[in-house]
Image: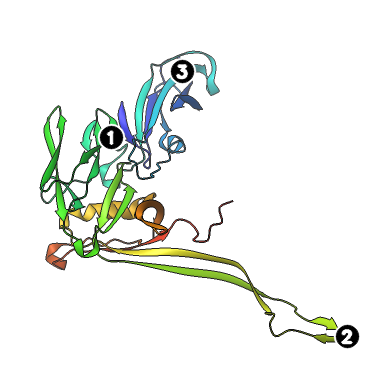
Amino acid sequence: MANILLRSPRLESVTVPSAMNSVELELTINGTLRYNIIKNGTVGTVLTFEIAELVRDYLNVTFNGTYTAQTADISFIYRYWSLPNGGGGGYSSSATTHKGFDGYGTFMEGINPTVSSYEWLIEKDVIKDGYYFYAPLGVSGVVPVSTNSVLSYTGFDTSNPQTISLATPIGNVLVNIIRVNCSRYGEGNKITFVNKYGALQDLWFFLKSVKTTTSTKETYNANTITISGGNATYSVNNPTKTVFNKSANQKIILSSGYYPEGANPFFEDLMLSKQIWLTQPDPYDPSTEQVVPVIINTSSFTYKTSLNDKLIEYTMEFDMAFDYINNVR
């Protein structure tokens, strides 16, 4: 079994055995048979089946403030047929199982990227050669982890300093919780996103935020002339230009505060994420929080270094992933 990343292709290969002329892949996702794919080939031909795109249709990561394990259970068998197109007689292989994560690998990582059975699911700081997670003072949180091939979330409390550990068959791997004092701006703004490993990860923007509302509209020219007493007239109180399709959207610009150079991959992961949420005070009840979906507008990322930039800070722009005027029907 492998923990596969579904935003990158997953190629499953099989060799056509003796006396067989076609191979059928039966793909089961989350306990339900979803696809039967047949390919023809002569003896010794290696056939490949790409399954990641098919499985990902059945995995949609959601977030409402609660961190839950969201993966896809994958199982498939090969059926070997003596005739092309699945005809004649044949036999079946034993089942192969995978766990699907909504993540991706990079080109440099090669074909069929996977997640280890025991691994912290955040980017490693290659400069400090360790795992570091950044949070405000006095705030608890979670760090995603794969333990025995199961996606879960290990919590940390409000202590400072603090480390959390993952006991693995090969030793103890620590995550260092680094506290940032951002009291000038409260706790800052928490962004939660699906990272490259397909796990929910928090990233705090510790400095100021700027929220704006913009509106769009369409207008048309109306005929306001009326006939009264045999004469044409109009009222100066009635507009000749009428507004329709009025809509509004909000965006927020967040400043990260100062991060070490080793945290650069966190911001790259955020920029490449397809699902992002902002935790903010409820505008109608500021004593509570609400989680709203956002779309990142920032489309380019320049790696900053302590040599070139001294202090490393990022500013990113997000659109609210909904119209401000409620039009859900």
In space, the residues marked 3 and 2 are separated at their CA atoms by 90 Å
Q: Count up the numbered dots.
A: 3
In the picture provided, is 24 more to the left or to the right than 217? left
Which amino acid type is marked by label 3? Answer: Tyr
User: Does residue 251 appear in the picture of this structure?
Assistant: yes
Q: Which is nearer the eye, 32 or 97?
A: 32
Which amino acid type is marked by label 1? Answer: Ser
Q: Position of residue 74 (x, y in %)?
A: 39, 28
User: Which residue is the site of mark 1?
Assistant: 152
Q: Position of residue 93 (x, y in %)?
A: 40, 16
Say whether disc 3 or disc 2 marks the residue closer to the N-terminus.
Answer: 3
In the picture provided, is 115 more to the left or to the right than 225? left
In space, the residues marked 2 and 1 are separated at their CA atoms by 79 Å
User: Which residue is the site of mark 3?
Assistant: 80
Q: Secondary structure at mark 3?
A: strand
User: Which residue is the site of mark 2?
Assistant: 229
